[in-house]
Image (tube, rainbow, N blue to C red):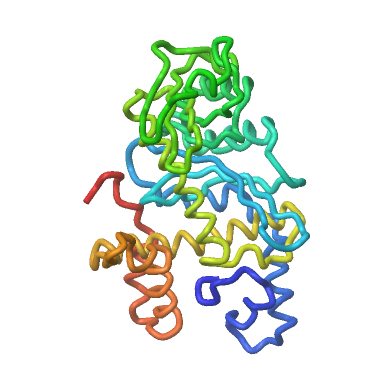
Amino acid sequence: MITGQTVNLSALCAHLPGTSSHDAKKRRAERALRDEQLTEEVFLSLLLPLLPTGKLLLSLDRTTRERGDAPLNLLVLGVIVNDYTLPLVWTALPHDGNSSTDHRLDLVKRLLKALPARRWKGLVADREFIGGAWFAFLREQGIKRAIRIRKNAVVDGLRIDEWFCDVQEGEVRCLFERAEVYGERMQVVATRSPVGDLVVIATDFRVQDTLKLYRKRWSIECTFASLKTRGFDLERTGVTQPARLERLFGFVILAWVACFRIGVWLAEQRPINVKKHGRKAVRLIRYGAESLTNALRWRLDGLKALLYVLMSPFPALGAA
């Protein structure tokens, strides 16, 4: 996957070692996706040691197929690291559209078994992830929340868009006291985006920290983009059976995190140039993928040093 930058099984066959036929290699890849030994615990055992020390901010979202008719709808929960979200647990939803409360509860419970709530700084999520039972569950688990709510949500008897109808772009405003949001007493923070959208967040964090933390939610969108057409072309997969799709996603994440980890390490050694428009010349994932692909194809003597990096956790958050 790293050298081919694709998840399509037919395309991957050209990158598998050996002299077997194309069909034999494809059957080998298909058998891997049917292997029931590849459980969530296996993927977590490889991903958790890479996490930085300290409290971790988590992000929850869905990624869906943008082309093709076969369903690809994955609910993903991960840790925010270096402006990306490193997925840790995921569920293939058997339908299009939003996740249910039960799916979200199940996903968080599964991760809590491996990553206790005391390691969680909190959870950020978009307005799809709302509801009384969901909000109450997070509080009961001791997980702080910064979750965007819809403008038609009713807080203390008044709609959100009525409370904050006159908020201007860039202005930050909050209610004087905590209010009842989906049955939970929370602080409500509002601002207006540059495109004019009212952004209102129900939060357990301090007002001055809430927007800064919520902006990090975008990191999961960056991850999804680098898994799709900008990276591993996840949408090209023909896999639709949920258990196999979850295993395939696990393989993709292992390939992706290898590129990510090498990219972060390289950026520490040789910082990425920033262009005149203010964006970096190359994304961290691409930076790592180029170096790792070159080592796997042409510089096997340099692979040992990279493998050492791949077994090392990401630098502590905030470290230089």
Placement of 173 over or under 54, stated as above or below = above
**Closer-to-camera residue (143/247):** 143
Direction from residue 42 to residue 173 in the image, left or right? left
Placement of 159 over or under 20, stated as above or below = above
**Closer-to-camera residue (173/311):** 173
Q: Residue furthest bottom?
A: 19
Q: Residue at x 47, y 37 (%)?
A: 115
Locate the N terminus and report the quarter of the image it occupies: bottom right
Q: Residue at x 44, y 34 (%)?
A: 192
Q: Residue at x 37, y 28 (%)?
A: 172
Q: Residue at x 66, y 71 (%)?
A: 8
Q: Position of residue 203 (x, y in %)?
A: 45, 24
How many labels sit on residues? Answer: 0
Q: Position of residue 303 (x, y in %)?
A: 37, 75
Direction from residue 72 to residue 110 in the image, left or right? left
Q: Position of residue 188 (x, y in %)?
A: 45, 21
**Closer-to-camera residue (166/89):** 166
